[in-house]
Amino acid sequence: VMLHAPLHIDSIVGCFCARGMMQHETLWDLPQQKIQLRARSCSVFVFHGRRDDVVPWSAARRSYQWLQAQCFDVCLRTEKWSSHASDCAREYREVAQFVASSWNRSAAV
């Protein structure tokens, strides 16, 4: 979603991904200019369980590596025992910290 948001929306300062991956069609019509703009302004927090059998870690990892290759600031966290439907207190804490940090960083600008 953040990659496809209109360019005039410049207030996207963070994105968190949990148990997901980018689909191949995500990149079909995505201009490099838009990717570079988002990479400069939007940090990405990723939390993914290693026991996810719906979105396997190996498939998800390729998405996160692509974001890093495009110069996104990616904070990647994995949980060895989490599956796709697991509740994980660590995940909730770290997402809350990321959101607060992104909010504070945007308020300072």
Image (cartoon, rainbow, N blue to C red):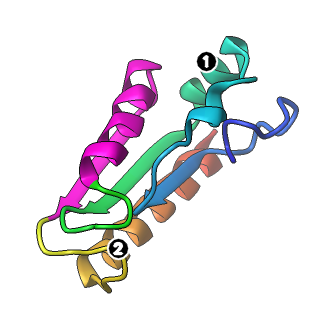
- Residue at image x 85%, y 35%? 6
Tag 2 residue: 84
Tag 1 residue: 36
Q: Position of residue 26 (x, y in %)?
A: 64, 35
In this view, the residue in front, 49 or 47, is 49
The earlier-in-sequence mark between 1 and 2 is 1
Q: Position of residue 72 (x, y in %)?
A: 46, 29
Quadrant housing residue 48? bottom left
- Residue at image x 44%, y 21%? 71
**Element type where label 1 sits in the image:** helix
Q: Above or below — where is 62 with respect to 101? A: above
Name the residue type under label 1. Answer: Gln
Q: Above or below — where is 54 with respect to 70? A: below
Q: Position of residue 105 (x, y in %)?
A: 53, 47
Q: Above or below — where is 52 with respect to 109? A: below
- Mark 1 vs mark 2: give the one in front: 2
Name the residue type under label 2. Answer: His
- The span from disc 1 to disc 2 (Cα, nearest Å) is 30 Å
Residue 72 has which mark?
none
Give the left or right position of residue 26, taking residue 98 as reference: right
What range is drawn magenta here? Answer: 57-79
Contact between marks 1 and 2 (CB within 8 A): the answer is: no
Q: Is residue 66 magenta?
A: yes
Give the left or right position of residue 91, taking residue 1 as reference: left
In this view, the residue in front, 84 or 17, is 84
